[in-house]
Image (cartoon, rainbow, N blue to C red):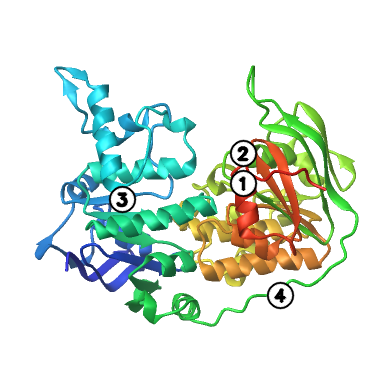
Amino acid sequence: MLLRLEKITKRFGRLTANDGVDFSLARGEVHALVGENGAGKSTLMKILYGEEQPTSGRIVLEGKETAFGSPSDAIAAGIGMVHQHFMLFPSLTIAENIVIGREPNSGLVFDRKAAAERVRALSERYGMPVDPMRVVSDCPVGVQQRVEILKVLNQGAKIVILDEPTGALTPLEVEWLLKAIRELAKQGISFILISHKLQEVMDAADRITVLRDGRVTGSMRAEETNLEELSRLMVGRELKRKAKKRIEPGEAVLELNDVTVSGGKGAKPLLDRIRLKVRSGEIVGIAGVSGNGQSELIQAIAGLRRIDEGSIKINGKDVTNAKPLAVREAGLAHIPEDRYLWGAAKEESVADNAVMGHLRSHSAGGFLKSGKIRETVNRYIASFRIKADSPDIPAKHLSGGNMQKLIVARELDHGTSFVIAAEPTRGVDIGAMEAIHESLLKRREEKGGVLLVSSELTEILQLSDRILVLYEGKIVGELSADEATEQHIGMLMAGGDRHDPA
């Protein structure tokens, strides 16, 4: 066995993140690690990568007990990690990013030609085509991920940890990546795959280990299990998907008419004459590869970005270029795509984050009502199974998935007529995904309208009544839920088979 983690335990004060975890990895194997948010996956990988030290237990690499005091120690031992959020320099070329820290020099000068040649050889050897001289900021997400993988392979990694590797990829890019992982495994590279997407885990992994509450609840070969068993091992119960009821949509709660956002002098518009409606009692899905106008669309509606042309109405009220508070008061709830940038104050308490933007309903006579605030946050924690030691701890101590659940609970609790749900299940486990989906469908049944912006096509297909596809700032297709397929949407997302929305 190439790697063994034996009886790994990690405690943070009273919290036990890992409790006697055993995990092993063979040469040329893809071993998936799955579990709910807060189950201990990230902590276990941080221990392996030298970012945390275990309270007890040991790491055995190639038959020798070892310890990593830092990521540099892990890299030197042949362990690389591709993080969920890429660690690339956008203004540098692909070659410069891959060789950084191991730059070829000609005398005292960086040898760009030698770097490009090295990257071409690396790319050819591992079957991961890239253009060494292309600037990273000009590359689609799928190519950037190849760069990350080639970077750790250039560092001599024989074990590669992939943290949620398909989160922002198109279906074709996901298919390509999973195939590439299998091909690299045939060449002797070993992979630890951390993912919430169980079907992808089943497609890519040789073995699967499930964590729940810091303990291993199951470890088996992929061909010996199924999605239902993995789900049950993750959450400790059977999951039941809520059926989507047929509802006759009502009046428009959101109307965009020819909304345009300039891309700057000489550049294409970031949004190009966008027309769309969301009616009460319906979910409208927005599909598209990241960077094709989704962020600008969300920000324009929420009052976070000015538009250059067109108009925006919420519940019939013109909110074009209005301030965010005025847009909120017109009837908007907003689950933001970046929970930390737009949705939370990490240094403040969980309780403060739970009532952020809703202080008026939790105060009287100019004073906050601490009892009502605590009642609200405890209700959120119970209904969404948020793992928090106390409502008084800083929100930065919540895992990303638990922070997401807190924001979703806060935004859906106030019965607004219109909801922007941007990447509502990004980074959350299958149990939390079930709860969030149920909440969005419930809002739809209550005759609210939802604009769902998601890179997860299965989520778009499962929840939406209508689906619009954004490509280079334009709506290039509109499909009903009944006619939409993953293949058709994926083609439109890549810029092919365009047609104007009906």
Gap in angstroms between the C-alphas marked 2 and 1: 9 Å
User: Quick one: 481 or 12, which is closer to the camera?
Assistant: 481
User: Quick one: 105 or 399, which is closer to the camera?
Assistant: 105
Q: Nearer the viewer, mark 2 or mark 4?
A: 2
Please give the residue where the numbered disc 1 appears in the rendered image. Answer: 493
| Marks 2 and 1 in Cβ contact (< 8 Å) | yes
Classify mark 2: helix, strand or loop.
Answer: loop
Q: Nearer the viewer, mark 3 or mark 1?
A: 1
Classify mark 3: helix, strand or loop.
Answer: strand
At label 4, counting other C-alpha atoms closer than 10 Å, the crowd grade (few under 14, some 14-19, many 20 or more) is: few
Gap in angstroms between the C-alphas marked 3 and 4: 39 Å
Classify mark 1: helix, strand or loop.
Answer: helix
Please give the residue where the numbered disc 3 appears in the rendered image. Answer: 81
Question: Could you tell whether 397 is left or right of 250 in the image?
Answer: left
Which badge, 1 or 4, is on the more N-terminal residue?
4
Please give the residue where the numbered disc 4 appears in the rendered image. Answer: 243
Which badge, 3 or 4, is on the more N-terminal residue?
3
Please give the residue where the numbered disc 2 appears in the rendered image. Answer: 292
Residue furthest to the left in view is 64
Residue 166 visible in the shown view: no
Residue type marked 2: Asn
